Image (cartoon, rainbow, N blue to C red):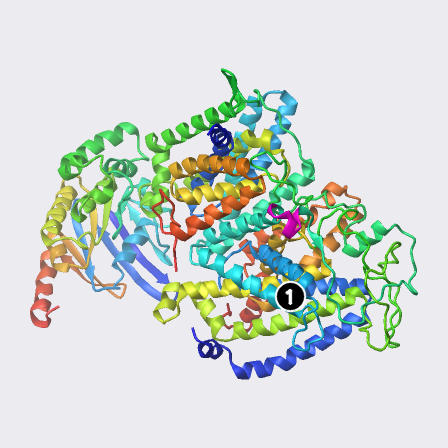
Amino acid sequence: MLAISHLTVDYGSARALDDLSMDVPRGEVTAVIGANGAGKSTLLRTLAGLVKPTSGSATLDGAEIIGHRPEDIVRLGLSLVPEGRSTVPELTVDENLRLGGLWRSRADRSSRQEELYGLFPVLADRRHLRADTLSGGERQQLAIGRALMSGPECLLLDEPSLGLAPLIVTQILELVRGLAIEKNLAVLLVEQNAVTALRAAHTAVVLNLGKVVMSGAASEIAAREELRHAYLGY
Amino acid sequence: MTVANLLSRISMSRLVVHAPAFIVLWLLLSRLNVALDPLYSYYLALVAMYATAMLGMVILVGLSGQVSLGNGALMAVGGYVFALTSLNWQTVPFFGWPWNGTWSMVFAAIGGLIVGLIIGLLGARLQGPYLAGLTLGIAVGVPAIANRFPDVLGGSQGFKLTVPYPEGGYASEPAQSETTGVSDEAALDEALGLAPGDDGGGSASAVPEPSVDSGDLLTLDDVQGGASAVPEPSVDSGDLLTLDDVQGGASAVPEPSVPPVPSEVAGIPGATDAGASTLDAATGTGLVLEQWQASLAVAVACIAGFVALNLVRGRQGQMWRAVRDDPVAAALVGIAPGATKVSAFVVSSVFAALAGAVFAQILTYVGPGAFGIGLSLSLLVGVILGGRSSLVGAVIGAVLIVGLPEVVSGLAGDRGWPDQVANNVPNLAYGLLLVLVVLAAPGGIVGTAREWWARRRGRPTPS
Amino acid sequence: MSTFLDYALGGVGPGTVVALLALALVLTWRSTRIVNFAQVGQAMFTTFIALAIQELTGSWVLALAGAMVAGAVLGLFVQVLVLRPVRRSDTSGAIIATFGVLIVLQSLAAMIWGGDPQSFPTPVSNAGIEVGDRVWPISPYDLLILGTAAVLVVALTLLFTRTGVGLAMRATAFNPEVARLSGVRVGRMLGLGWALAGLVGAVAGVLVAPSATLSPNSYDILLVFAFTAAVVGGLDSLVGAVFFGVMTGVILGLVTGYSDSSSAPVAVLVLLAANLWLKPEGFFGRGKARVV
């Protein structure tokens, strides 16, 4: 389980995360939703080690991850699929996947790679092509695949739906949900697109201005969201 | 870009305020010039000359954010244009202005402008390293051009020029000076600031001098025998700087207010009268050569400082800084980033060319050796150490470049270090300081001082 | 026609050296987005070390090996001590720092070994090979240069395309954040990039030493040649650096043959200027050179 405790992050004088605490259990997808600037991306980037928090801690199965460098956090079992350009376009599909598992042993790597090609057949077809020949959805699959190559206990996804067609998004998120259950991963999913995220998730947390304002079962939050949609149109 | 547009970038009120300040500065420096021993005038001339060039470097490197190794080559352009035109244009009067060299200075500035424009258009709009590399190539290539056309440009030996002094000439007879009896070579060495016995071959140049062996592909004819990164043209004093011409004898100063000083440049046997008239107390300038050179250098430096200050403090300076800090934002407010960067390059080129013309007159000589890459590096070192975004930093840098080698050599000499080590200590210091400044104090002396001062008062620092 | 061929072929050996130096420049550019203007200074310094080894042991091979080790160490040293601490946003600072390092290396070399040019022995003959009744402009030594360079380039290519380290280095160069998130120790990759560049530069320095008389400043002209070759090829392109390095040598051979040696830097300068005007990102480059 990923346990986040009193995490505070400041960008200069602007507070992005304000004493945030939450748990991300294994075997489930936890969605983090909220308006722009609510601090969602900051949360993920801080957990991955790209941003240094002002205070607070986070432990993955008991091991502290705050204060370590990103490359070490990966070895502790946490993998981030960052927003946007999260593959290396100049490398081939195969190389992108290999990259994700470089720090593991070769045997580990090849077995994992084969498994992922099974999971993402589209990638298998294009394995020796450069990543920039892939479509948006395919690239997102590759990005997730790369993150999975390191055999994480906890997977963080930063707005995977960005720029993708709704059908693709649904497919990918369903896949992620399946993985979470199958491999007993703790999945933290950050999304702008609340409706889609809530459908794929088990639990949801709503952030506003760096604080948790609502949390609970995804279906419940969804109901409230729909209420807001219905009455206020957003 | 219309004239009105250009003029709008200069604030008239600022000009009015600044002008008297510079006039006062010029008067003070001139007074200092004649009050001191001619050897100090020589140093003053060097500092003023370097300051002129470094003002341009501050505009280019500091305010516009472009690293260039080419200003030494642009000084060469100015120096050579001056030398070539003054050979032929000396007699053409400049609208009644008494000094015969004015036309040549103008041509030197124009030459700098044209060459600067070409280089700027080529490189200023590219990312930093491209311009740096291009200007490096130019710095190395310019001496080669002189070698390529030895008839016109004097080849690797360069050529002497006679200084277009005002009517009345300057003193040639060592009237009251104490001839110390040392050999003329030693006296010349001392005048040029070279360590005794140094024929320029000992120290490594602070930068690329094409080394030799014609016929070998990756080498070039030797242009210089390892000039130091510092001012002196490293030439075989025996060969190139012949002493036929009057080279500043001791004073026989007519003005009673200036006491006769024993000139360090003692009477040089064999100094003939090649055209220099003896001093005419009524119409002469009363200055020895070094003093005249210093007065020219100081005048040019003051004018340059005046122009620079007005540009920097005005709209043009803001445009330069804006493009340096954020070209996209600048473009969005209507500033053309490419043209702005090129303009900074051109302005610095004109300054460099003028400094080069002054340099030629200080040395009374132009040759590839004097304008090698060591010179470009000295300019860069000077502005970085002094403060790359500060005009005052340019002056401080000039003082450092002229003074540091002397100080360091003195220290090294005291400790009895071998020549091989002692000659290279200044360059080593330059290199280490460059790195240290970039890492620890990017603003140089002035920049760091400003930051410290601003922090004490709790205010944001200017850039 | 035979003179043309003679001149051109005569330039291949020197061109190979330029190619290696250009390769070194591209290596540091790709890994850290910095053009290491101190590269020739490093090459000069390590060649002096090689000369010392040569004089001590009499073995050229040992000298070359020693230079390679020294080159890698020096390259790593410079990256870690000087370039890494420079703030990423201060591109002017990085450029200035490399010039600082160049000056330091030249002054140190002059202090330690003096400013006089030294000669470096060749392990094999430097005279043109006779085939049939003709003396060709290629000597056994030129062949040694070509052979050594070829081995080096092949080794590097294998490193980059077939090994995990090579993949990590390429990923770091293309997208450091994703590399980090994949567990790559990015700092080490940067240092490794500079170490490799230093090694390549050191090899170039030793190879060129016999013809360029070694002194603290004698390699500086090579910087201009190597930079031009790297830029014309595209600063991102290893292939471009090698190809245009050799081409630069050939051009220099032709220019020096038909004109004289002082035209060489001018010719290279014209080439550089033309390239920056027409195609600043280079022939094989894919990066963006023009900023404003």
In the rendering, at what x and y percent does residue C200 appear? 48, 33
Give the SS element for disc 1.
helix
Crowdedness near tag 1: few (<14), some (14–19) or many (≥20) residues, C-alpha within 10 Å: many
Helix, strand or loop for the magenta stretch, by majority:
helix
Q: Which residue is mark 1?
A: B104
Question: Relative to A4, does residue A232 appear above or below in the rendering?
Answer: below
Name the side, left or right, on which A168 lies relative to C114: left
User: Label 1 marks which chain's residue?
Assistant: B
Q: Which residue type carries mark 1?
A: Ser
Can residue B55 be seen by looking at this rendering?
Answer: no
Name the side, left or right, on which B166 lies relative to C243: right
Quadrant occupied by the N terminus of chain B: bottom left
Name the side, left or right, on which B151 lies relative to C283: right
Name the side, left or right, on which C47 lies relative to A58: right
Can residue C229 be seen by looking at this rendering?
Answer: yes
The magenta segment is B148-155
Question: Relative to B231, does residue A1 appear above or below in the rendering?
Answer: above
Residue A113: quarter of image: top left
In the rendering, at what x and y percent does residue A32 appear? 20, 57
Question: Relative to B150, does residue A205 appear above or below in the rendering?
Answer: below
In the rendering, at what x and y percent does residue C245 appear? 45, 37
* Residue at x-position 79% and y-position 51%: B242
Q: Is residue A113 magenta?
A: no
